[in-house]
Amino acid sequence: MRTLTAPDRWLALLLAALAGYVDSLGFLHLGGVFVSFMSGNTTRLAVSLAEGRWLAAGAVGGVLLLFILGAMLGALVAGGEGARSRSRVLALEAALLAGAALAAGAGLAPLAISLMVLAMAVENSVFLRDGEVGVSLTYMTGTLVKTGHALAAALRGGDPWAFRPYMALWAGLAGGALMGAAVYGRLGLIALWPAAALAMVLALKMRFNRVA
């Protein structure tokens, strides 16, 4: 985050909020399974296996496999770095989220969840750097570790405000999750439409307002 330009920082914050929003909807609908936080799902998979709950383990395992597929798809669609690459990734994410909203409206909740998982995995290819994820958008463990390291550096005489970009990213995801939880009770998974719209607006901005 500290090496990003100001516009890219805002993009990262918006995408973190989008991820938190979508993950909150999925978490509430599935009763504790995440659509973007695969570390938590890995723990749930292990616990389900240990307790002999094979159906639950199979469901979580399916989510993990879908996420891997989505990450692969995102990297293939990105095809590199830069604004045009980001635009392609964001357009795909928007299409997946719109498809999830349509599926939810048609009563096809399993399909909606599957498309949400793919969309969250795809999002992580927005900030590619040397072929790898440059900024974590759908998970915050590494971001919080960097926050702690920045605070330690400040205590040793370093920049006292170096932690702010990392905390801002975390706050973006937390704020999005709060918003998703607030609307889920009234709209259910139909609340995915605003998320799809935001992803498409960002895709168009990358395509027409930025030079690759």
Image (tube, rainbow, N blue to C red):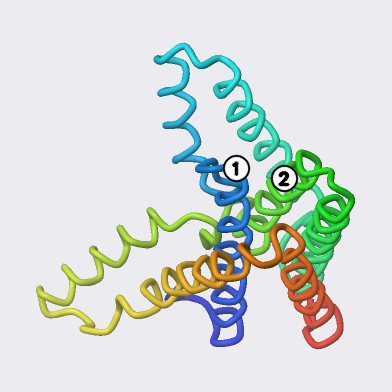
Please name the amino acid that badge 2 sits on: Ile
Question: What residue occupies the far front of the structure in this picture?
Answer: 186
Determine the residue positioned at 72% across, 57% down: 189
Determine the residue positioned at 42% across, 74% down: 171
Determine the residue positioned at 48% across, 55% down: 139
Can you tell which mark lies on residue 113? 2
Who is closer to the viewer here, 100 or 90?
Answer: 100
Q: Alpha carbon of mark 2 to alpha carbon of mark 1: how far? A: 9 Å
Q: Are marks 2 and 1 in contact (CB under 8 Å)?
A: yes
Q: Is residue 19 left or right of residue 83?
A: left
* Rendered view: 210 above or below 147: below
* Rendered view: 158 above or below 76: below
Q: Residues within 10 Å of mark 1 (few under 14, many from 20)?
A: some
Can you tell which mark lies on residue 30? 1
Where in the figure is residue 12, as x and y percent of width and height? 57, 73
Q: Is residue 191 left or right of residue 55?
A: right
Determine the residue positioned at 36% across, 74% down: 167
Q: Quadrant of residue 54?
A: top right
Who is closer to the viewer here, 157 or 111?
Answer: 111
- Circle 1: element type: helix
Where in the figure is residue 122, as x and y percent of width and height? 71, 52
Please name the amino acid that badge 1 sits on: Leu
Q: Is residue 91 left or right of residue 135?
A: right
Where in the figure is residue 99, as x and y percent of width and height? 86, 55
Where in the figure is residue 60, as x and y percent of width and height? 58, 30
* Rendered view: 62 above or below 78: above
